[in-house]
Amino acid sequence: MQPPSRRDFVSLTVTDSGGYTNGKQRRQSCWRKWKQLSRLQRSLILFVLALLLIGGIATYPRLSAHSGDTAVEGNGSEGKQPFVVDMKNQARLALHEPPSERKISRKRGPPVLQNRVQSKGNGSEPQGAELKIVQEEDGTKKLISWRGAVIEAEQGTDPNAKEKEKAAEPEDPSAVQQESRLEAVREAFRHAWKGYKDFAWGHDELKPVSKSHSEWFGLGLTLVDALDTMWILGLKEEFQEAREWVDKELSFNKNVDVNLFESTIRILGGLLSTYHLTGDVLFLEKAKDIGSRLMPAFSTPSKIPYSDVNIGKGTAHPPRWTSDSTVAEVTSIQLEFRELGRLTGDPKYQAAVMEVMRQVHKLEGKQDGLVPMFINTNSGQFTHLGIYTLGARADSYYEYLLKQWIQGGKKETELLEDYLQAVEGVKKNLLKKSSPLGLTFVGELSHGHFSPKMDHLVCFLPGTLALGAHHGLDAEHMELAKQLMETCYQMYAQMETGLAPEIAHFNMQTGSAQDVDVKLADRHNLLRPETVESLFYLYRFTKDKRYQNWGWEILQSFNKYTRVETGGYTSINNVRDPKNPSPRDKMESFFLGETLKYFYLLFSDDPNLVSLDKYVFNTEAHALPIWPQAE
Ligand code: DMJ
């Protein structure tokens, strides 16, 4: 007797459209015929049938898949839509990729649709299933599944899908670290701002220890200096209240003497930068007001400006004891007045500051491109010849040569020539190595005598050199920048508080215990930005995490030794005494305008957060646009 299954199989293969009775008779006659066959014939037939069965099982899935393909093509050609994006290949890739690669491919495409491809293909679909995104005339997108079902692209989208996706993905540790460091800077800013708000609102500087304030120009200096920092850090509430103050309270119609350089870099620069970042014309109007009030400074016999201007009376004068101005001061106001000229279309601003550059370019008294520290407003000549430094009174002259060249679209060759010559002058006259670490440092020259003295202010130089290299200057500048960066970092690391002194002296004798020595009078720290500024440039251009980590150490030290509990940060007198760093009771406006801003930019991995291909920072960290090429 044959097993029932085999009977069923035979009956299925021979069944025709006849009725039940007819079929039964046929089955009986078949059985009879089968019985009449020889054993060999029966074996042969069974063998052939077995072969057919095996072949059929093997080819079934491919046939089935092929029929799926056909179904999709059919749906795709129904003529409902003008655009058809074939997802066939993407879907196959997604289905075949190992999990790690799949994650990458998901990020490339529209998230909702790509997710669907993946969830559909989660092992339950035959391989090779296809999807099509169909875009309707009204712009809406539909997804056609491999079975031909049409799904609204937005329909069924879990509003929390992205969050869930994020939670499911293992967190990127460097992104977590970045966010926590950025938050630490925002926290530091809020703390500094709290002190300013509680005890110094609308005044120039906070005295955080005595919970009071000091006045320099009486123009809310800290608030104005900090505007674009708040914007960059995303501190909207703080920014809004500061904007309110600028709108309602900030008036330049005041009988006060202001320093031309300081008010240009902090106030004019701050307002212009905030105008560019926010597009808010309030800041442009204020910038125009202060800019025009500073112009009397240029009315001198030589056209080299006086250091001081009374912005209420419209008069200007040099300091009481001399008719000299500081070289860095008269040559570091150009970025701001050039930009003001461009925005207002009034040529007087550019003309005034470029006249200074024109004169300084051809002046006698430089050594290999290095400038003296003073210039006389009557004669227009350098004075106190023979002393060359990249520190106080000369520093930002070098910085602004390069930055003006960049601002103007790299066309002003005299500026570039002066910059390149000065870098060579530094290399030839001021660079030396310390002991024991062999750090490269920038000393000073006094009438031919080298002094291993380096101001913290000089630490702007690694950043400036790196910026020049980024803009196409000699790659050697970048190498020097890296060496000097290490030196500036060591000025912090070798101090007991982890904070740099105002002035360092480098040991050059072999056998010295450490590279950095500090004289008693130079042990203070004013919360200056230069090292953090350079770390920012170096990190932007090299992506070497070491620079971020150095910055992070420095921020910890500021928090440990300069943070005042009730709000604000204070300058200190002694970076060598961690037990008693001796607070000075002053928070300089540049701590908010520059130091904290550069910390934030340093810890951010976003090169477009104030792109260095679109902006130049003035010497107070205010961002000014690089001019469009046609201008
Ligand atoms: C700032 O006002 C500017 O960075 C200037 O160029 C130098 N001095 C302070 C910060 O140290």
Image (tube, rainbow, N blue to C red):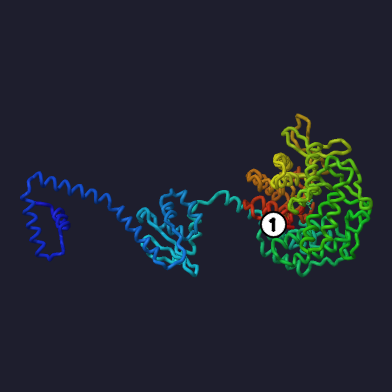
Question: Residue 470, relative to residue 429: is it above or below?
Answer: below
Q: Residues within 10 Å of mark 1 (few under 14, many from 20)?
A: many
Question: Residue 39, relative to residue 76: is it above or below?
Answer: above
Along the viewing direction, whichever of 487 and 30 lies nearer the viewer? 30
Residue that label 1 marks: 189
Within the image, what quadrant is residue 7 found in?
A: bottom left
The spot of residue 498 in percent (x, y) is: 71, 44
Q: Amino acid at mark 1?
A: Phe
Question: Residue 292, relative to residue 50: is it above or below?
Answer: below
Respond yes or no on whether mark 1 lies under 8 Å from ligand 1: no
Q: Can residue 493 be spotted in the picture? A: no
Q: Is residue 71 left or right of residue 549?
A: left
The spot of residue 516 in percent (x, y) is: 76, 38
The spot of residue 512 in percent (x, y) is: 76, 32
Q: Residue at x 57, y 51 (%)?
A: 175
Q: Residue at x 68, y 47 (%)?
A: 551
Circle 1 sits in a helix, a strand or a loop, which is it?
helix
Q: Is residue 497 left or right of residue 217?
A: left
Along the viewing direction, whichever of 239 and 358 lies nearer the viewer? 358
Q: Is residue 407 left or right of residue 107?
A: right
Along the viewing direction, whichever of 82 and 607 lies nearer the viewer? 82
Within the image, what quadrant is residue 368 found in?
A: top right
The spot of residue 200 in percent (x, y) is: 77, 62
Q: Can residue 514 be spotted in the picture? A: yes
Furthest toward the top, the residue is 511
Number of marks in picture: 1
Q: Is residue 188 left or right of residue 323?
A: left
Q: Quadrant of the C terminus?
A: bottom right
